[in-house]
Image (cartoon, helix red, strand yellow):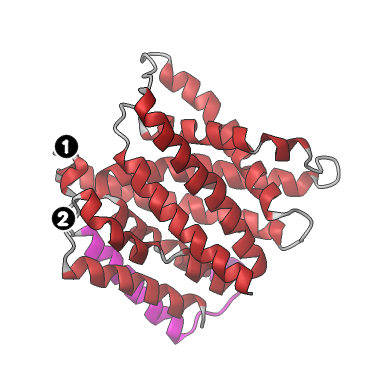
């Protein structure tokens, strides 16, 4: 239990810090291209793990994990990067707090799980926090183009799309981890491979008409560190938490990023207002009510 709690909290912190790092990187790469670069680097770091996977014994489980990576990492993270540039770290992570609730509704719809009054109250709190976050002013360092209403509306759409893809990927991953035959490290590696398989062909078509921008050397240390922190370490800790903790407890702790993101507001030029603070804490408290009922 203690290992799972520490893994979930550290995973949430790693994802929050890496999100801020990715947003601070000045590049002409699109969200899809940036995510593709991240997936390639992260997969290379875990290549040794891929070489020793039980491909013949666990074929079905590994295929499900690849599909999980395609949804949650290739699609979900691309949408997340697109939202991050427009909304900032704190607001994007607050909207990401809808994920556990969507997972709960999935259980109610497809697994005949019952959602009681406490859960509904949590859902109302999270929905309210998302509305508050949506109407907060965007960070001043986000660029004038990203502060327009159309860009903000598009950012909200990207964030919600990322949540849906992330929850779908997590549901598939959870299904395999419950069998206990694949370790969190192996799960992280195969999910990254699944994301790579999906995004590389699309990136080749996307990049052909445009000269591929070469990042200057000064950006590579930040890119590598953000990848190792948020993608490699973050996914491994996430899988460990889902393995060691009950689903509700693990999801609650992994969703504490909105509060942690409050510490990064000043760095991003994101003015910390009472509404933003209330939205962050309201989201986490609502999730706690919903998934621990």
Residue 193 point in image, percent of width and height: 63, 37
Q: Main secondary structure of the magenta part?
A: helix
For the residues labelled 2 and 1, the Cα–Cα distance comes to 14 Å
Residue 99 vs residue 92: left or right?
right
Please say whether residue 256 is one of the residues in the magenta stretch: no
> Is the residue 170 above or below the residue 69 in the image?
below
Any part of residue 264 in sight? yes
Quarter assignment of residue 200: top right
For the point 19% across and 69% down, which residue is it?
A: 275
Residue at the disc numbered 1: 145
Q: Residue at x 51, y 56 (%)?
A: 167
Q: Which x, y percent locates residue 69? A: 59, 44
Q: Is residue 111 visible in the rendered structure shown here?
A: no
Callout 2: helix, strand or loop?
A: loop
> Is 126 covered by the magenta stretch?
yes
The secondary structure type at the circle numbered 1 is helix
Start and end of the magenta stretch? 107-134
Q: Which residue is mark 2?
A: 137
**How far from the left and from the top, in percent, is residue 77?**
45, 44
Q: Residues within 10 Å of mark 1 (few under 14, many from 20)?
A: few
- The numbered mark, 2 or 1, whose residue comes first in the sequence reads 2
In the picture, which quadrant includes the N terminus?
A: bottom right
Q: Which mark is residue 195?
A: none
Residues 201 and 81: in front is 81
Q: Which residue is most to the right?
A: 57
- Residue at left offset 71%, top offset 43%: 63
């Amino acid at each position: 239990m203690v290992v799972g709690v520490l893994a979930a909290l550290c995973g949430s912190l790693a994802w929050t810090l890496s999100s801020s790092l990715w947003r601070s990187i000045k590049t002409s790469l699109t969200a899809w291209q940036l995510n593709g670069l991240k997936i390639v680097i992260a997969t290379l770091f875990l290549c040794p793990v891929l070489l020793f996977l039980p491909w013949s014994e666990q074929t079905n489980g590994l295929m499900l994990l690849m599909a999980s990576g395609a949804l949650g990492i290739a699609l979900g993270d691309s949408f997340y990067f697109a939202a991050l540039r427009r909304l900032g770290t704190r607001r994007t992570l607050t909207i990401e707090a809808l994920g556990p609730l969507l997972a709960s509704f999935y259980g109610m719809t497809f697994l005949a799980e019952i959602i009681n009054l406490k859960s509904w109250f949590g859902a109302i709190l999270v929905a309210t926090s998302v509305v508050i976050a949506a109407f907060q002013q965007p960070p001043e360092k986000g660029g004038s183009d990203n502060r327009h209403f159309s860009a903000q509306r598009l950012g909200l759409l990207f964030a919600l799309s990322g949540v849906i893809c992330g929850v779908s990927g997590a549901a598939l991953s959870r299904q395999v981890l419950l069998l206990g035959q694949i370790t969190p490290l192996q799960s992280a590696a195969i999910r990254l491979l699944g994301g790579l398989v999906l995004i590389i062909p699309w990136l080749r078509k996307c990049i052909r008409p445009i000269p591929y921008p070469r990042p200057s050397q000064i950006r590579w240390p930040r890119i590598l560190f953000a990848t190792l922190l948020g993608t490699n370490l973050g996914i491994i800790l996430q899988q460990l938490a889902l393995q060691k903790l009950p689903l509700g407890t693990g999801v609650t702790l992994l969703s504490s990023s909105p509060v942690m993101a409050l510490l990064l507001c000043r760095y991003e030029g994101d003015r910390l207002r009472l509404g933003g603070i209330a939205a962050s804490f309201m989201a986490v408290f609502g999730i706690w009510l919903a998934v621990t009922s």
